[in-house]
Image (cartoon, rainbow, N blue to C red):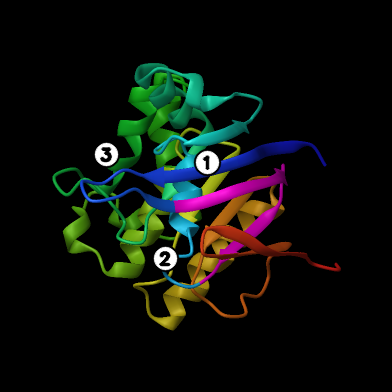
Amino acid sequence: MSELIRLEAVSLTYPSAAKSLPALHNISLSIGAGEHVAVVGRSGSGKSSLLNLITGIDHPTAGRLWVGGSEIHGLQEGPLALWRGRTVGIVFQFFQLIPTLTVLENLLLPMEFVGAIPEKERQGRALSLLEQVGIADHRGKLPGNLAGGEQQRAALARALANDPPLIVADEPTGNLDSRNAELVSSLLLSLAKAGKTVVVVTHERNPAGYSRIITLADGAVVADERSAS
């Protein structure tokens, strides 16, 4: 299995007016291509901070980090945004769809920004992705006219727009009922089986179906368990 993500002695501290706030401490780990990873831990353990580093949203205070062979935190903002659009699909707990664009337009926008998908193929690809997540019939609707589970499926389709090798999801089922949560989890599992690297932050105590579970506590990795299968 080839390595997609590597962290070497990475720490992250958020500055504040009163005092610095440590979020991650001396984390070293690697994640291989095609792994389906759950990141678990209590609130404040550093789970979302770890995702923010992997996606280039935050910059490490110390240590080094590579994703897809690129040491992303050495990039300027413009190249970093382009790298992110090509390499990472992000699924947020609160969907983060653009409310004034239709579901279809929410998928076309990242394709236009990155330019990785030829223009003549974009509409067909967007429709195919919406079909894949089961909401093609809603392509002309605004996000606010969709139920929460449908919005999350639209967000997942958008994350796949540029065919990135890495999908990261921050509590993607946290605001969904049990049926939609199971559907979204199954979609993420199918992506891992298809060869995507999928990293999911979750509050589930005993998450099932993952090839690996990384547990954080107080900003440090305290357990790293791989499935026996």
Q: Which mark is residue 105?
A: 3
Residue 120 visible (yes or no): no
Residue plotted at (59% across, 58% down)? 220
Q: Which residues are magenta?
A: 23-41
Nearest to N terminus: mark 3 or mark 1: 1
Closer to the observer: label 2 or label 3? Answer: 2
Residue 140 visible (yes or no): yes
Q: Which mark is residue 54?
A: 1
Pick the residue in front: 81 or 45: 45
Q: Are marks 1 and 2 in contact (CB under 8 Å)?
A: no
Q: Secondary structure at mark 3?
A: helix
Up the image or down, 48 lies above or below 3; here it is: below
Q: Secondary structure at mark 2?
A: loop
The answer for how far apart the CA atoms under marks 1 and 2 are is: 17 Å
Residue under numbered circle 2 = 44
Labels in figure, total: 3
Up the image or down, 228 lies above or below 113; here it is: below
Q: Amino acid at mark 1?
A: Ile
Pick the residue in front: 168 or 121: 168
Nearest to N terminus: mark 1 or mark 2: 2
The answer for how far apart the CA atoms under marks 3 and 1 are is: 27 Å
Q: Amino acid at mark 3?
A: Glu
The answer for how far apart the CA atoms under marks 2 and 3 are is: 35 Å
